[in-house]
Image (spheres, grey):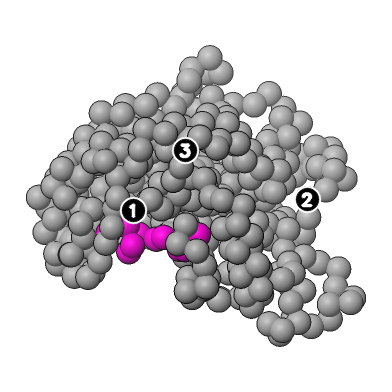
Amino acid sequence: MSGVFRIGVRLVKGTPGAGSPATPLFIAARNISGKTLRGSKLSKPKPFPYLEKQYTAWNACMDVLRKNTTSRFDENTKVVVVDGPIAAGKSAFAKELAAELEMKYFPEVTMDNYYINPYGYDMRQLDAKLPATMQSFDVTKFHQNPTHRNAASFQVRMLVERFSQYADALAHLFSTGEGVVLDRSVYSDFVFLEAMFRNGYVSKGARSVYYDLVKNTFCDLMKPHLVIYLDVPVDVVKQRIKKRANPAEVSSKALTDQYLKDIETIYKQQYLKDISTHAELLIYDWSDYGETEVVVEDIERIDFDRFDKDDPKMRDWVMENEEDWTEARCRYMNKPDLMNSLNVPRFDVPELTVSPDDFKAWYDVWYSAPGMQFRKGYNEECGDTGILTKMKADFRNTL
């Protein structure tokens, strides 16, 4: 069921199996622990309010002196990614897993992350006012017309949104000490790009731009500690798509047998092979779903500290001192600079290039929409108040 290195759980005096059923097993800091086995909630120092407060150089200096970054860490300060094909059951499982491990759940990214602004206004409503090259394109439109010129920009935008979410997940981990569980991540996004390319949905040029972005940005991220892959064969995927009766999926021109087979092949032959050299990997046959408790038991047996600094596994999470940890934290707290690395100039791919006139038309319409004229918190027409005396801003809004 899984190819994980297993170790025993050490018993201490007064634990179950050692004479007292009332006290939970002792779990070393290197092992993730579930709340069922632990028997109590994790206790952590006060988190840094990273969503409301800017992380300054002064904060960083104080954190180094007081060891505030690593003081929040415990055995569950880990990045866990749940992956698998379409309709595998990832979302329900990832939510249950996050609850059991007392980690923050990050749902799968969709284009809603981009099109719905901080005030809840759906920017797709503006399509009628925009030139065709600048109109919205989301997964529903991809299902309807996978060879549309905007399919390439759609997948590039998905990469950007997944990169943004992963940066948020790392900022949360470093600021609170709470581990995170992500429903897919930026690292497996290429699976869909490759499947699109193999089926003629995107061009070779668009694929080249995509990997330029990957090359320029992934070096700034820290890879997950653990990836859990829910394996579901294509015939079962098709049955589940039919059963959940999403009209866009059922009538999809994109979700052909070949496209779904390519997703499965790329996941298994490329993604899992590569990610397993950096992270721990658990693979489960999820054809008939499975028990979250069984997965948690497997996770609790993984020794994340058995690798030294020269081993590629967990290398991102081996640091010499508090200064290194705080430096890494600063990277994810300064999200605008991190997102700027996605600005890779490429003007040789027609479907990813727009004319100055089309861009100007888009800009004028986009930034006249409700809540788009000023930064979040400063749009009076959307109900924001106290603007003249406001001292706080949404430092992580990158829309």
Mark 3, Cα crowd under 10 Å, few <14 / some 14-19 / many 20+, is some
Q: Position of residue 297 (x, y in %)?
A: 32, 45
Answer left or right for 38 relative to 370.
Answer: left
Residue sitting at 56 percent across and 58 percent down?
358
Residue most toward the right?
Answer: 389
Q: Nearer the viewer, residue 46 or 43?
A: 46
Which structural element holds mark 1?
loop
Residue at which label 3 appears: 349
Q: Is residue 7 visible?
A: no
Residue at which label 1 appears: 148
Mark 2, Cα crowd under 10 Å, few <14 / some 14-19 / many 20+, is some
Residues shaded magenta: 134-143
Which structural element holds mark 3?
loop
Cβ–Cβ below 8 Å for labels 3 and 2? no
Residue at which label 2 appears: 55
Residue 197 sits in quarter: top left
The residues tagged by marks 1 and 2 sit, at their Cα atoms, a distance apart of: 42 Å
Answer left or right for 296 relative to 177.
Answer: left
N-terminal label among 3 and 2: 2
Q: Nearer the viewer, residue 176 or 129?
A: 129
Q: Position of residue 70 (x, y in %)?
A: 68, 40
Image quarter of the C terminus: bottom right
The residues tagged by marks 3 and 2 sit, at their Cα atoms, a distance apart of: 38 Å
The residues tagged by marks 3 and 1 sit, at their Cα atoms, a distance apart of: 14 Å
Q: Is residue 358 visible?
A: yes
Badge 2 amino acid:
Tyr
